[in-house]
């Protein structure tokens, strides 16, 4: 069965994370979409009770679509570190605390890796995961997932991007996501890969 197409007009970006909203708005803008963040629309953040990125993305998209009466696009993404059993995973944002202090979160990840004796790039293998859910007010949703593999470095490098970007080097690269030009990051990121699938199935003519 083919995916439901987005018919144009306004779209709620179901996030209060400014960096994430900015990336998503940049990705949808070529399609003539009027994107409004959940914060701008005055929507509350639902409690993320899912056990996976996909479940949390769907939960946020459905909540925003129901509350706004508009289609809503939600992202749930995070960093999964092999040596830490996949942590911080769906709790990536929570590791930054209520103040969203990602330097503290990155420090915590590095400390956990050092405690586990993970010192080489191979031992510090990690991946960014992004689930995107596009939901409509009638309850229908389309869901896509993207991943990008790499390894973690310390100390953090670069001031671009957001979240854990300054410690993540994508496979085959030398620069962290925090050092890369935004356009270069968008070309290979987990969010861009999930978004490419979303565009193909729901946005492209």
Image (spheres, grey):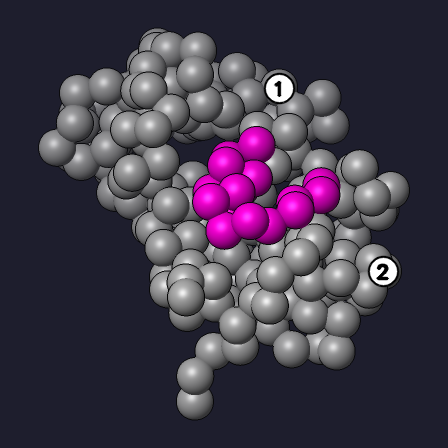
Q: Where does the image place residue 152, in percent across and percent down from the top left?
A: 29, 27
Q: Is residue 7 left or right of residue 16?
A: left
The image quarter containing residue 9 is bottom right
Q: Residue 114 sits in which quadrant? A: top left
Q: Residue at x 43, y 89 (%)?
A: 1
Pinpoint residue 125: horizontal percent, then vertical percent. Answer: 24, 37
Going from N to C along the chain, the mark reached first, 1 or 2, is 2
- Tell me what residue is drawn at x 52 percent, y 42 percent: 29
* The one of 9 and 177 positioned closer to us in this rendering: 9
| 91 vs 201: above or below | above
The correct choice, above or below, for 145 with respect to 94 in the image is: below
Q: Which residues are magenta?
A: 22-37
* Residue in view at x 65 percent, y 46 percent: 34
Report which residue position mark 2 lands on: 67
Is residue 128 in view from this perspective? yes
Mark 1 to mark 2 CA distance (whole Å): 29 Å
Question: Of the residues tagged 1 and 2, which is closer to the observer?
Answer: 2
For the C terminus, the quadrant is: bottom left
Classify 102 as above or below 73: above
How many circles with numbers are drawn on the protein?
Answer: 2
Along the viewing direction, whichever of 21 and 92 lies nearer the viewer: 21
Q: Secondary structure at mark 2?
A: helix
Crowd band around label 1 with a 10 angstrom C-alpha radius: few (<14), some (14–19), many (20+): some
List the residue tagged with mark 1: 101
What kind of element bears circle 1?
loop
- Residue 149 located left or right of residue 136: left
Secondary structure mainly formed by the magenta segment: helix
């Amino acid at each position: 069965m083919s995916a439901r197409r987005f018919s144009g007009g306004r779209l709620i970006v179901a996030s209060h994370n400014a960096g994430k909203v900015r990336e998503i708005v940049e990705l949808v803008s070529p399609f003539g979409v009027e994107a409004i963040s959940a914060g701008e629309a005055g929507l509350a953040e639902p409690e993320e009770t899912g056990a996976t990125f996909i479940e949390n993305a769907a939960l946020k998209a459905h909540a925003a679509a129901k509350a706004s009466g508009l289609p809503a696009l939600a992202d749930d993404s995070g960093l999964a570190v092999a040596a830490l059993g996949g942590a911080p995973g769906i709790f990536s944002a929570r590791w930054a605390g209520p103040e969203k202090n990602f330097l503290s979160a990155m420090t915590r990840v590095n400390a956990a890796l050092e405690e586990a004796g993970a010192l080489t790039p191979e031992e510090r293998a990690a991946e960014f995961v992004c689930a995107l859910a596009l939901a409509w007010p009638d309850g229908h949703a389309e869901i896509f997932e993207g991943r990008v593999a790499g390894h973690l470095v310390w100390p953090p490098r670069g001031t671009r991007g957001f979240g854990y970007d300054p410690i993540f080097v994508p496979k085959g690269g030398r620069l962290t996501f925090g050092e890369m030009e935004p356009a270069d990051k968008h070309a290979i990121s987990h969010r861009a890969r999930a978004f490419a699938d979303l565009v193909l199935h729901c946005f492209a003519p």
